[in-house]
Amino acid sequence: MPIHLPPISRRKLLAQSLSASAGFAALSLVPGSLYSEETTEKRDAANWLLWSDPHIDKNRERDNKGTGFYMYKNFIAATKEVIEKKKGAAGIFINGDCANQYGLRPDYKVLAELLEPLSKAGFAIHMTMGNHDHRGRFLDVLKDRLPNNKPRVGRRVGVVEAKDVNWFLLDTLKTVNGTPGAMGKKQLAWLQEELDKRKEKPAIVMLHHNPKTGKDKKFDGWGLIDTDDLFAAVKPRKHVKAMIFGHTHHWGLDQVDDIHLINLPALGRIFQKDEPLGWVDATLRSDGMTVELRALDTKHKAHGDKHDLKWRT
């Protein structure tokens, strides 16, 4: 399963609940069941915060190759904003590349330090694996903070069942510090099976690597090598409404067969000077979702960029 970090106030209860569960039930932190009181009374079940590519390094003063963009400081800036302005959000997704390059234990120790204020503020945090992460070292460092769980299909996959949508979290890590990603046959089979169990609500699929659509060739060489297999799985399942990914350090929207493709900006560091650093504020509706870019530099031309996405039928 992905990495689920419950709020500090509920970790003990969730750990006990999940350790007693078997099979797929242990993969879900479910608003409406395990922490329903917090979700229904204190949290906006429709509002989710989407982060990606924080690239946290053991060196808190390390910047992005001399650009002056400091990953540690960027994470703190985003944390301060969401605690001050978005404390009622249902939760935070951090979509891969949590570590800077090789997924080293010291990197994850700094990440654990940075996650603490978010957890103390009551946010449930769900993290996926990127190509700069290491599954074993990640869990080794954060094991005392996580519910008891075991990997499925050799990957950290899982589902977060929210009020209006089911989030399917994938693990496309192929090689640590290698650029392309992959689903693999077992994960694809798992995804199809779990999608078919949950047809009653819209589905959003989240993965780190960008699907290769052929529309922007500069990103295709970095992307998901079995993109065609993934699209073959989700296109006929009409309840799949959107796919969210990071990896390219680019903010952008696209559609393939009316499935929304949402490319999250990087939080930690940029590749191109005109790209924004930041995160996305997502609000669900019965027929779609509104996404708004929150740039760390509020003077950036893309800051506040908002789009209303309508679900396919």
Image (cartoon, helix red, strand yellow):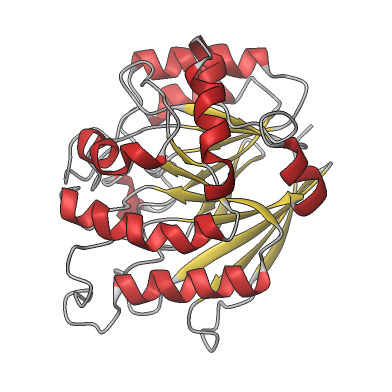
275 relative to 298, above or below: above
The quadrant in which residue 238 appears is top right
Left or right? Give the position of 259 relative to 182: right
Residue 8: x, y in percent?
A: 52, 49
Q: Is residue 251 visible?
A: no
Q: Residue at x 64, y 76 (%)?
A: 304
Residue 206: x, y in percent?
A: 51, 39
Q: Is residue 201 visible?
A: yes
Q: Residue at x 35, y 77 (%)?
A: 73
* Total residue callouts: 0
The quadrant in which residue 14 appears is top right
- Which residue sits furthest bottom? 299
> In which quadrant is the C terminus drawn?
top right
Residue 129: x, y in percent?
A: 34, 40
Left or right? Give the position of 174 relative to 307: left
The quadrant in which residue 287 appears is top right
Residue 142: x, y in percent?
A: 32, 43
Q: Residue at x 71, y 27 (%)?
A: 239
50 relative to 31, above or below: below
Q: Residue at x 42, y 33 (%)?
A: 2
Left or right? Give the position of 71 relative to 120: left
53 relative to 12, above or below: below
